[in-house]
Image: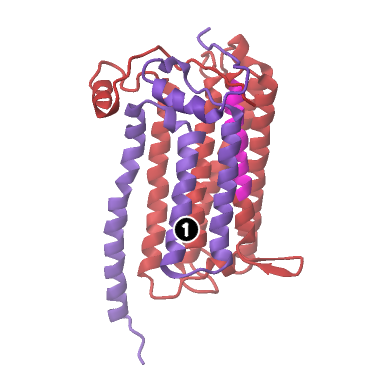
Amino acid sequence: MAETALTNAGDSLERIEGWRGIAADWSSDQRAFKNVSWGKAMMWIFLLSDTFIFSCFLLSYMTARMSTTVPWPNPSEVFALTLGGQHIPLILIAIMTFVLISSSGTMAMAVNFGYRRDRAKTAVLMLITAALGATFVGMQAFEWTKLIMEGVRPWANPWGAAQFGSSFFMITGFHGTHVTFGVIFLIAIARKVWRGDFDVERRGFFTSRKGHYEIVEIMGLYWHFVDLVWVFIFAFFYLW
Amino acid sequence: MADAVVHLEGQQPSLRIHAHDARAAGATHAKGQQHPIKLYLVVWGWLFVLSTCSYLVDYFGLHGYLRWSLILLFMVLKAGLIVAVFMHMAWERLALTYAILLPPVLVLVFVAIMVLESDYTHLIRVISFALPT
């Protein structure tokens, strides 16, 4: 348990503390993100832009919900399931949340084992992450099917404000798409790890560049972001 | 090969490693992301606890300001744990951390604008489309 992996994130660079350090980095030549590789920096900037997209979705949902004069359907009731004769509110969403959090946990450990160059454990943990992600998408498909059968449409639903359907399909649909693409990329990179591409520095199919184990961490950033977005959707859409 | 792998043996408490890592990051930052697996398991456990808590808020049907403040509290704690530990933001260089974490804060301005706007829309709808009594 106590073993740790040391990784090299670039050149050894002096760092000034606090705001003076930030000003020094940003005013220096060529690179603001000194020891951060371009791949990781670009993933962070992509995630920042994605943050704004999801913010806009949640904001439009907030605006619709606050300005409607028709009562909003109670998500606690809408997403309730009857399991074993018991009526449990919001249970499917709770299970989906736990599945996604677990996938984040396995992903974090995959990153760690990747930096230790433990190929088998990294690949297996990534595949578990992908499997949990696929489970999440499957449960979401079940939820969509259930709601559509009950008559929820983007323009109407049996319980109240019409905007409920459009907000629901837009927000969870966009998030589910993110999860789906994450699963695809997880499997692709797990295959490369398993094959040992990053140990023998095999060149990539598209870019002809050598890969590094850092790609596992960059993939992890995307995956954790998907989990992060779900935290906000869970709070604002399902619990509010 | 730039990536050096070192296995530290022994019983080093995870938190001490991190306090040390955070402080020494300025001098020897080249070490990058070195964290024991235990840290991830602890965070994982906390995320489960916090998710359960936010589910229980709904299960017990709490209402009003108590409900909203609890939901927001658990949400912020979960988001903070994911970004800081799982995404390693706690150990990144400040220039990157601020560049990524400050812009989303501005979304709160957008939220304030849309709250005012939707209150106004709601008012107009109530006045104009009032059901005949």
Place of residue B112 in the rendered image (x, y in percent of width and height, measured from the top left): 28, 57
Q: Is residue A105 magenta?
A: yes
Q: Residue at x 68, y 35 (%)?
A: A128
Q: Residue at x 57, y 23 (%)?
A: B12
Q: Is residue A32 above or below residue A160?
A: above
**The color chain A is rendered in:** red
**Colouring scheme, one of rainbow, by chain, secondary structure, one colour:** by chain
Q: Residues within 10 Å of mark 1 (few under 14, many from 20)?
A: many
Tell me the magenta residue range: A98-114
Residue at the outermost top position: B1
**The color chain B is rendered in:** purple
Q: Is residue A192 above or below residue A210?
A: below
Q: Residue at x 70, y 22 (%)?
A: A120
Place of residue A10 in the rendered image (x, y in percent of width and height, measured from the top left): 43, 14
Q: Dot 1 falls on which chain?
A: B
Screen quadrant of the C terminus of chain B: bottom left
Q: Is residue A222 left or right of residue B127?
A: right
**What residue would you read off at disc 1?**
B71
